[in-house]
């Protein structure tokens, strides 16, 4: 089966790279078209997959500049005639019109509840799904919270595939003994949907109070206040380390060698009931979790595999909670055990075959349609 995958995520996006490997290992001919400015990748990360790169950032200011790119992508689809075109971004859904005209089957991988996101990003994404959904044959989504919205459309095949992590990939990373307690976070450093400035202030206060605690933060940011805070902490705190870009293989290594994983979000309807990659990374690595939000199954973590705060909590309460956790090594070890158990019960390997089942269903639909 010839499968074309398109996305505007960073080239080494965890969710997409896992999906690509799953499909490739099943013996399919996979081409991945990546449209992004973050195109660094670890050697061999997408082995056996044809990767076509377009260095372009699809944003509101560049929407008209994207027209020539979309023409090129349309021509690519017409020339290659893939059996399945699989897009990971709502803005790419219009390309599925071309795929359908060429007799291909189509899939939209709905990572987020875009229809709940305010502003141009969310509204334009929801518009694409609403107006072009008839060209989508199969839908992939990440949490049950998305099902009510999805039911508005007549998708032929639907698969729930949460953002679980690969047990195989995490097992490859070595765990090295270390002194003290390590805090870690790698990912989005926005202060819009993430509570990044509060996270940095908590880390700064903890590192000043406990010299034996260290923290590594990784991720790029365009926000001046966040960048200034990071620069200030890097200059004055020897136990604080910042990396602007980290290959995902390194993210796995640092996560497994941390003691406490940080993940603070702000109230956003898209965040509520989500399936955060970050939480599932911490579970697969078996580390204690310090988090703020109401994501899927947060109640299984709170007080067991970590500490979960609501959106309304104030800074002082979170700071006291972080200090208590840092000072209680036995509690951290108990949380690590609970985290590891949850991670083993929620592996990528337990859900990845749903992609292959979806493709098989779509191809059967295609055959049935051609026979009529």
Image: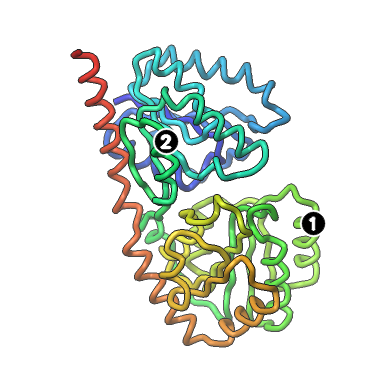
Q: Residue 267: percent from the left, percent from the top?
A: 61, 58
Residue 90, above or below 315: above
For residue 156, what is the image quadrant?
top left
Q: Count the numbered circles shown.
A: 2
Give the secondary structure at mark 2: loop
Q: Nearer the viewer, residue 71 or 18?
A: 71
Residue at x 40% of width, y 54% of height: 164
Q: Quadrant of the N terminus?
A: top left
Q: Nearer the viewer, residue 128 or 355?
A: 128
Graded by Cα atoms within 10 Å as few (under 14), some (14 to 19) or many (20 or more), the crowding at tag 1 reads: few
Q: Residue 332: percent from the left, percent from the top?
A: 49, 81
Give the secondary structure at mark 1: helix
Residue 365, above or below 332: above
Residue 267, above or below 101: below
Q: Answer with mark 1 or mark 2, whichever residue precedes in sequence.
A: 2
Going by the image, does 307 lie left or right of 334?
right
Residue at x 70% of width, y 73% of height: 315
Residue 128, above or below 161: above
Residue at x 39% of width, y 51% of height: 144
Going by the image, does 306 lie left or right of 100?
right
Q: Quadrant of the C terminus?
A: top left
Display colour scheme: rainbow
Residue to which mark 2 is pinned: 152
Residue to which mark 1 is pinned: 225
Residue at x 49% of width, y 74% of height: 306
Q: What is the CA distance from the residue labelled 1 to the residue labelled 2? A: 40 Å
Q: Name the front one of labels 1 and 2.
A: 2
């Amino acid at each position: 089966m010839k499968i074309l995958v398109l996305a505007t995520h960073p080239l080494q996006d965890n969710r997409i790279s896992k999906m690509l490997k799953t499909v490739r290992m099943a013996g399919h001919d996979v081409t991945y078209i990546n449209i992004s400015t973050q195109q660094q990748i670890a050697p061999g990360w997408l082995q056996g997959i044809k990767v076509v790169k377009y260095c372009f950032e699809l944003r509101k200011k560049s929407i008209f500049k994207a027209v020539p790119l979309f023409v090129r992508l349309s021509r690519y689809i017409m020339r290659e005639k893939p059996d399945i075109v699989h897009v990971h971004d709502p803005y790419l859904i219009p390309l599925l019109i071309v795929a359908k005209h060429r007799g291909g089957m189509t899939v939209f991988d709905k990572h987020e509840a875009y229809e709940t996101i305010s502003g141009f990003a969310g509204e334009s994404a929801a518009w694409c799904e609403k107006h072009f959904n008839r060209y989508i044959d199969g839908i992939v989504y990440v949490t049950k919270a998305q099902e009510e919205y999805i039911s508005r459309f007549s998708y032929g095949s639907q698969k729930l595939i949460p953002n679980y992590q690969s047990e195989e990939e995490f097992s490859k990373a070595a765990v090295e003994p270390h002194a003290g307690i390590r805090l870690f976070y790698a990912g989005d450093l926005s202060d819009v949907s993430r509570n990044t400035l509060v996270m940095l202030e908590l880390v700064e206060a903890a590192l000043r109070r406990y010299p034996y605690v260290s923290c590594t933060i990784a991720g790029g940011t365009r926000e001046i206040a966040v960048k200034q805070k990071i620069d200030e902490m890097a200059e004055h705190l020897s136990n604080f380390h910042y990396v602007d870009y980290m290959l995902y293989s390194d993210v796995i290594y640092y996560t497994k060698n941390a003691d406490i994983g940080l993940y603070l979000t702000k109230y956003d309807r898209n965040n509520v009931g989500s399936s955060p990659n970050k939480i599932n990374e911490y579970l697969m690595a078996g580390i204690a979790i310090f988090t703020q939000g109401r994501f899927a199954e947060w109640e299984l973590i709170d007080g067991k595999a970590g500490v979960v705060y609501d959106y309304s909590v104030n800074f002082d309460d979170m700071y006291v909670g972080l200090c208590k956790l840092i000072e209680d090594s036995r509690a951290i070890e108990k949380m690590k055990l609970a985290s590891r158990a949850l991670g083993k019960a929620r592996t990528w390997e337990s859900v990845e075959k749903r992609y292959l089942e979806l493709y098989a269903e779509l191809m059967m639909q295609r055959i049935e349609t051609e026979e009529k």
